[in-house]
Image (tube, grey):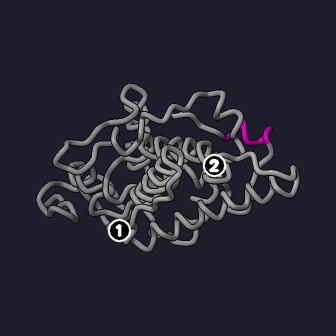
Amino acid sequence: MPLSCAICEERKEKRFCPAVHGKICPQCCGEQREVTLDCPSECPYLLQARQQAREHAKERPLQARNSNEGPSDDEIAMPEVEIDEQFLYQHQELILGLGFALVKSALAERSLMDRDLIAALSSLAKSYQTLVNSNLIYEPPMANLAHQAIAREVESMVREFREEEQNHLGLTRLRDSDILKVLVFLLQLGLVRTSGRPKSRAFVDFLLAQFPEKQSLIAGPDEAGNRIVIP
């Protein structure tokens, strides 16, 4: 008698699932992947699904959610903040620095999901948008401790950049509007990379691949240009 799926116990099992340490059916794999299952990054079915999602994202970079599911991706991604390729080229080190701050957060708290990074980036970006538009310092409340930790790591990197500029140039050239654009760029990159599922770590894994654990905090311009990925 054919063995049944370890999840539904109804359909025939056809593939090994490292998340349940047993065999499951393709339907449960597709439905429960990164929803109820903590899928390890090396799972071949997860990697295949991510590849398919990237191909689909080329056609529809930001896929808006239904309004009854909360704010849409277009609202979260702040499309009103204009970012061109020249800006990305001129601010490569800042992009990589803030990206590495996200990596440090992910390494410090291995349970972080894409949605945690995206939520923290969205909150930070809105704070800087208020600062740029009205010169008012506004910090949206973050009840989630993990999101607070991510925000602190990013702000710490911003301070490091400004201190380096002050030490080497005698002044600080980094503007709040530059930080806003970089935060929005990373936010949009996260929305493109994530699967949108509750337990998705596609964006987290992407960042970890870009920034090896022992890499320096701030890369040189030549090295930076080789790693920036435009969504």
Q: Residue at x 27, y 47 (%)?
A: 71
Badge 2 density bin: few <14, some 14–19, many ≥20, Cα 10 Å: some
Tell me the amino acid under the disc marked 2. Answer: Gln
Q: Is residue 56 left or right of residue 185?
A: left
Residue at 87 percent of width and 49 percent of height: 169
- Between 139 and 44, which is closer to the camera in this rendering? 139
Quarter of image, res 199: bottom left
Assign the N terminus to one quadrant of the image: bottom left
Q: Residue at x 39, y 36 (%)?
A: 52
The residues colored magenta run 221-227
Which residue is the extreme one toward the top?
Answer: 59
Provide the residue designation for mark 1.
Answer: 21
Give the residue number, with chain letter if any, for mark 2: 210
Q: Give the camera-side residue of 106 and 50.
A: 106
From the viewer's perspective, is 217 left or right of 115?
Answer: right
In the image, 106 versus 64, the foreground residue is 64
Per the image, label 2 sits on a secondary structure element best described as: helix
Q: Quadrant of residue 54?
A: top left
Residue drawn at (20%, 42%), measured in percent from left and top?
Answer: 66
Depicted 35 relative to depicted 60: above or below: below
The answer to whether residue 201 is visible is no
Say if residue 143 shows up in the picture.
Answer: yes
Q: Could you tell me residue 188's position as x and y percent?
A: 46, 41
For the view shown, which residue lies furthest in the left direction?
10
Nearest to N terminus: mark 2 or mark 1: 1
User: Is 222 in the magenta?
Assistant: yes
| Mark 1 closeness class: few <14, some 14–19, many ≥20 residues within 10 Å | few
User: What amino acid is found at the position of numbered circle 1 in the picture?
Assistant: His
